[in-house]
Image (cartoon, helix red, strand yellow):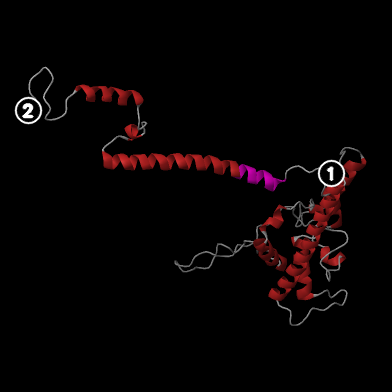
Amino acid sequence: MGRYDFRPLRVHRTASQLLAAERIKNVPPWHEVIGTIPPAQTLVRSQPSQHQEKSRRPNTKKPSKLFRPQRIVYEEDSLRKEFFGDHPWELARPRVVLENDGRDAERKDWSLLSQPDRHVDGESVVQRQTFLLHGNPETGQMPDPNMTPAKAYDQARKEFYEVRLQEDIERRVAKEEALATGAYFGKTTLQIGMELEDKMFEEWKAWASNEVLQQDQSRAAMYTGVDSEAAALPESNPELEAAVGELEAIIPARGQEALGGATVRT
């Protein structure tokens, strides 16, 4: 073998000969790499020298977050959290996810809140507030030096309210025009909800009245010694009153002599 081992250098040549003779159908993945970067004397890497671990104090804890990736945080995240925290129902509006690819600031001029090719939503407020804070250096629009996040949020929110008010007025006018031309609209979700609420209230009202009546009867029976069931009976019974009247006519009163009998002692 000699002092040097040239077998690793012959691997590429042998593989090339086998490919030329069609003994190997597929080219190995390492064929071009070994041809560009020839191997050393051996194909097996020697194990590098291991560093000895330094003695550490017994009370020293091993860092647990050393290899944990850092959290990616953007400025727009805090702006979105603030806006949608104040307006949670904006998340219930239908939206097209394909509109927001994260590069709206590069293609749109956020000096105005309304854009011609997209609907105004919470993301529009976030981009508008970012523009008020930092401007757009690409177009040379610089921000106001006295602008603060609170002022930018108030201004963007005010413009957002004006757009929502204009959309509401347009919907009302369109509905009135449709009704004037003979259109018919069914009950709205608000009307259906109010009817269901009224129905449940009437059922609860009847149940509550019955509960109050039973409590009053139980309270009255507690002081009179009459059962609540007895207290619920009707006060007058015609048959019972007629029978009592007949008995009162036959039984003599106190101190009156009995007819055809012994004297009643008082």
Q: Amino acid at mark 1?
A: Ala
Principal secondary structure, stretch drawn in magenta: helix
Q: Nearer the viewer, residue 230 or 146?
A: 230
In this orientation, does residue 169 appear? yes
Give the quarter of the image for residue 217.
Answer: top left
Q: Residue furthest right?
A: 20
Q: Position of residue 113 (x, y in %)?
A: 81, 67
Estimate how packed mark 1 is, as few (under 14), some (14 to 19) or many (20 or more) residues with alpha carbons within 10 Å.
Answer: few
Is-magenta flag for residue 53? no
Q: Is residue 172 left or right of residue 250?
A: right
Tag in front: 1 or 2: 2
Q: Amino acid at mark 2?
A: Arg
Q: Which residue is mark 2?
A: 265
Q: Position of residue 163 (x, y in %)?
A: 79, 63
- Mark 1 vs mark 2, CA separation in Å: 95 Å
Q: Nearer the viewer, residue 7 or 246?
A: 246
**Residue 11 tag number:** none
Q: Mark 1 or mark 2: which comes first in sequence?
A: 1
Q: Nearer the viewer, residue 225 or 170?
A: 225
Instruction: Name the residue: 71% across, 75% down.
Output: 151
Instruction: Name the residue: 70% across, 63% down.
Output: 80
- In the image, residue 29 sits, relative to residue 256, either above or below, namely below
- Boundaries of the magenta span: 188-197
Q: Nearer the viewer, residue 26 or 258?
A: 258
Instruction: Name the residue: 70% across, 46% down.
Output: 189
Q: Is residue 64 left or right of residue 178?
A: left
Q: Which residue is mark 1?
A: 183
Quick one: SS at disc 2? loop
